[in-house]
Image (spheres, rainbow, N blue to C red):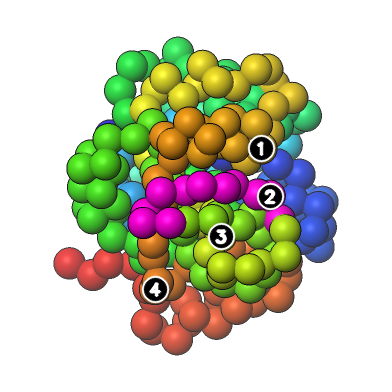
């Protein structure tokens, strides 16, 4: 299943880093958070990615264009310009990088990916959140309920969009209210491709009109995830993720 990652925002709340690089390229340990997200999906066999770029898109493009050299030892013959790469990376990902514009909203970015997504169901998440959600169980849940959209619901602090859930059905989708039930939008969506038709234009915010409409249509279900989830909105978040990474017990890395 194709995985869409929204990676085009300005990341203004973590400007200590994003003045120079886009938020998804901020490193957790020795790799960008975007890499960690992709590696998690790939560990479940989902290795075809479509990345919606925007702010400083050239930095993400350059990272993947030069990934093999950046992550390997190599010998370069300066006269012939021949490069011999040693200990090559073994990742087998297929990555489509699409510049969706610096000012497009989240829904607008998705609509610009329609031709790359095709007619099949697809996964979607944000380029700044890590989790250990079981993607096999998530996919099974989505198929069993057969709704247009499945969202992963998580329970962190009260600064994100809240979901009103009754018997696994999302009855209300509100962007960043005061938390009442405790469940919020954690990303890690699975969507039918027809959902994209509900997006009006590049100014559409995914988390407002489109998802609110799907909830009213009784076509939005929530997969409740009670374990690890953490986004990276601020430097404090980044520091916390690094603390977890260097602890040696990393929830989002699956060991073979």
Q: Earlier in the sequence, mark 4 or mark 3?
A: 3
Disc 3 marks which residue?
184
Disc 4 marks which residue?
227
The x, y position of residue 90, in whole percent, is 26, 48
Instruction: Please say whether residue 115 is visible from this viewpoint.
Output: yes
The x, y position of residue 105, in whole percent, is 70, 32
In this view, the mark in front (4 or 3):
3
| Discs 4, 2 touching: Cβ within 8 Å | no
Q: Is residue 174 magenta?
A: yes
The x, y position of residue 187, in whole percent, is 50, 50
Q: Secondary structure at mark 2?
A: loop
Q: Earlier in the sequence, mark 3 or mark 1?
A: 3
Tell me which corner region of the image, top left, top right, bottom left or bottom right, holds residue 83: top left
In this view, the mark in front (4 or 2):
2
Disc 2 marks which residue?
175
Q: Earlier in the sequence, mark 4 or mark 2?
A: 2
Q: Earlier in the sequence, mark 3 or mark 2?
A: 2
At horizontal 41% and vertical 49% (from top left) the residue drawn is 169
CA separation, marks 4 and 3? 13 Å
| Discs 3, 1 touching: Cβ within 8 Å | no
CA separation, marks 2 and 1? 7 Å
Disc 1 marks which residue?
208
At horizontal 69% and vertical 21% (from top left) the residue drawn is 202
| Discs 2, 1 touching: Cβ within 8 Å | yes
At horizontal 60% and vertical 78% (from top left) the residue drawn is 240
Q: Which residues fall within the magenta stretch?
A: 166-176
Q: Earlier in the sequence, mark 1 or mark 4?
A: 1
């Amino acid at each position: 299943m194709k995985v869409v990652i929204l990676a085009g925002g300005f990341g203004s709340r973590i400007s200590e880093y994003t003045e120079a690089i886009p938020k998804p390229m901020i490193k957790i340990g020795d790799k960008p958070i975007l890499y960690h997200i992709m590696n998690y999906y790939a560990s479940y066999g989902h290795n075809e990615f479509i990345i919606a770029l925007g702010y400083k898109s050239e930095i993400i493009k350059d990272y993947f264009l030069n990934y093999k050299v950046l992550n390997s030892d190599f010998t370069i013959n300066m006269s012939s310009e021949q490069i011999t790469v040693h200990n090559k990376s073994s990742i087998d990902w297929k990555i489509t990088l699409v510049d969706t514009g610096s000012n497009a909203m989240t829904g607008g970015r998705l609509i610009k990916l329609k031709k790359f997504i095709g007619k099949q169901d697809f996964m979607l998440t944000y380029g700044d959140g890590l989790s250990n959600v079981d993607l096999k169980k998530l996919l099974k849940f989505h198929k069993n309920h057969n709704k247009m959209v499945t969202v992963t619901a998580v329970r962190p602090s009260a600064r994100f969009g809240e979901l009103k859930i009754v018997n696994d059905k999302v009855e209300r989708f509100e962007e960043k209210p005061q938390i009442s039930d405790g469940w919020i939008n954690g990303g890690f969506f699975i969507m039918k491709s027809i959902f994209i038709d509900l997006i009006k234009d590049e100014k559409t915010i995914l988390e407002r009109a489109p998802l609110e409409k799907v909830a009213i249509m009784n076509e939005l279900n929530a997969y409740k995830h009670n374990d690890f989830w953490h986004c990276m909105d601020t430097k404090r978040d980044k520091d916390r993720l690094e603390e977890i990474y260097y602890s040696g017990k990393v929830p989002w890395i699956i060991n073979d």
